[in-house]
Image (cartoon, rainbow, N blue to C red):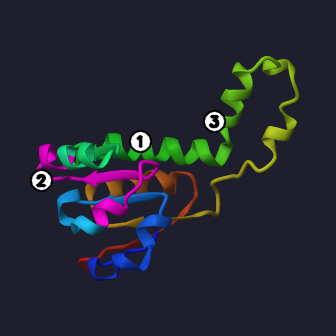
Amino acid sequence: VEHIPLSRLSDGKIESAAAVLLHSLAYLPRAAQRRLRSYHLILCLGSADRAVDSSLAADLGLRLVHVDTSRAEEIADTVMALFLGLLRRTHLLSRHALSASGWLGSVQPLCRGMRRCRGLVLGIVGRSASARALATRSLAFKMSVLYFDVHS
């Protein structure tokens, strides 16, 4: 996770990102909006005007996800579930179960690379209600939590 101020958007950082988190697409200069690609995950966190963001995303050919900040518990649950899924490689196990070899095939190679949560460090940007809820959940898994808040 890297915070990029608007003054540094021309450094090629948007093009190399896997996900872009922002409050609103409308805050980005038009040149930066045009450099976003369809493979980017664009998350608008608590966007003030969803219609404007949705319209901009449609014009740019982007898929946009609005995160409703009033759903802190649900956001934290989902983020934790996705995090656990990546650590435990459940997406690969699911794909294997649906394949022709199914569970009869060897699962052992898929289990290589699975990681435990205990001892990992989770970095959280911001101190929103959903960030605090996520921190609480990660502590239950014996993880350490670091956070960065632009406003503190």
39, 107: nearer the viewer: 39
The local crowd at label 1, few if under 14, some if 14 to 19, many if 20 or more residues have their Cα within 10 Å, is: some
x and y, in percent, of residue 131 in the image: 35, 58
Q: Which residue is mark 1?
A: 77
The CA span between labels 1 and 3 is: 17 Å
Left or right: 64 in relation to 81? left
Q: Residue at x 18, y 44 (%)?
A: 55
The CA span between labels 2 and 3 is: 34 Å
Disc on the earlier residue, 2 or 1: 2
The answer to whether the residue labelled 2 contacts the one labelled 3, judged by CB atoms less than 8 Å apart, is: no
The local crowd at label 2, few if under 14, some if 14 to 19, many if 20 or more residues have their Cα within 10 Å, is: few
147, 15: nearer the viewer: 15
Q: Which amino acid, mark 3?
A: His
Quick one: quadrant of the C terminus? bottom left
70, 68: nearer the viewer: 68
Q: Is residue 71 magenta?
A: no
Q: Which quadrant would residue 15 be assigned to in this image?
A: bottom left
Per the rendering, the mark at residue 91 is: 3
Disc on the earlier residue, 2 or 3: 2
Q: Residue at x 79, y 39 (%)?
A: 110
